[in-house]
Image (tube, helix red, strand yellow):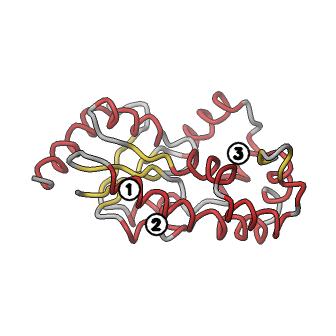
Amino acid sequence: MIKIGLTGGIGSGKTTVAKVFETLGIPVFYADDRAKHLMNTDPSLKALVMEHFGKEAYKNEELDRKFLASIVFNNKEKLALLNSLTHPATIRDAEEWMSRQISLYTIKEAALLFESGAAEQLDHIIGVYAPQDIRIKRVMQRDQLPVEEIMKRISRQMDEEMKMKRCDFVITNNDQQLVIPQVLELHKRFSEESK
């Protein structure tokens, strides 16, 4: 089975593209959602988070995301530490999940595919590209965040141009080019490749 990565910066439209693949019957692994789930359910990961961030990282056995965010979002070293704890667990979980799927190919959607090392486990990487001004506008509407906060988040991600250069395929999601035909073209390609 072919394993495909799907990545892009904040507000690029990764999830939208992933949903189109899902409507075509392709299973999608959402790495961010799974990471949050694992931080609540994986005993060894929970232990590591408490060891490095304190028992206050959990309230009533549930991850206190606000507490953790207050630590990592303004401290690159702490964010890198948290990622170094969650990425291996999420990569393992994705490998197990992909091995259980019965389809022509699977997709792993993750913002940090290259940064986490997960890209090395995948056969192809699709990048979802949108110009920064469009991404900022989308995130402002979606998350009700001020521009400064969005820019801070963008600055913590790999440069978008560099990320797209590392991808095997790029879907342009700039509100001018239609996304569905681009997805259908890739779907056809991967389906033929996996036969």
Q: Residue furthest front?
A: 43
Which one is nearer the viewer's eye here, 130 or 116?
116
Residue 30 lies, in percent from the top left, at 49, 46
Residue type (three-letter) at the residue carrying disc 2: Ala
Residue 118 lies, in percent from the top left, at 46, 66
Give the number of the disc on residue 5: 1
Relative to 34, 50 lies left or right: right
Which one is nearer the viewer's eye here, 128 or 64?
64
Is label 2 in a helix, a strand or a loop? helix
- Tell me the CA gap for discs 2 and 1: 9 Å
Give the number of the disc on residue 150: 3
- Tell me the CA gap for discs 3 and 2: 25 Å
Q: Residues within 10 Å of mark 3 (few under 14, many from 20)?
A: some
- The answer to whether the residues at label 2 and label 1 have Cβ atoms under 8 Å apart is yes
Residue at the image point whose x is 66% and y is 68% from the top: 85
Relative to 184, 99 lies left or right: right
Relative to 37, 9 lies left or right: left
Question: Residue 75 occupies which quadrant of the picture?
Answer: bottom right
- The answer to whether the residues at label 3 and label 2 have Cβ atoms under 8 Å apart is no
Give the number of the disc on residue 118: 2
Residue type (three-letter) at the residue carrying disc 3: Ile
Residue type (three-letter) at the residue carrying disc 1: Gly
Which one is nearer the viewer's eye here, 191 or 147?
191
Residue 19 lies, in percent from the top left, at 40, 33
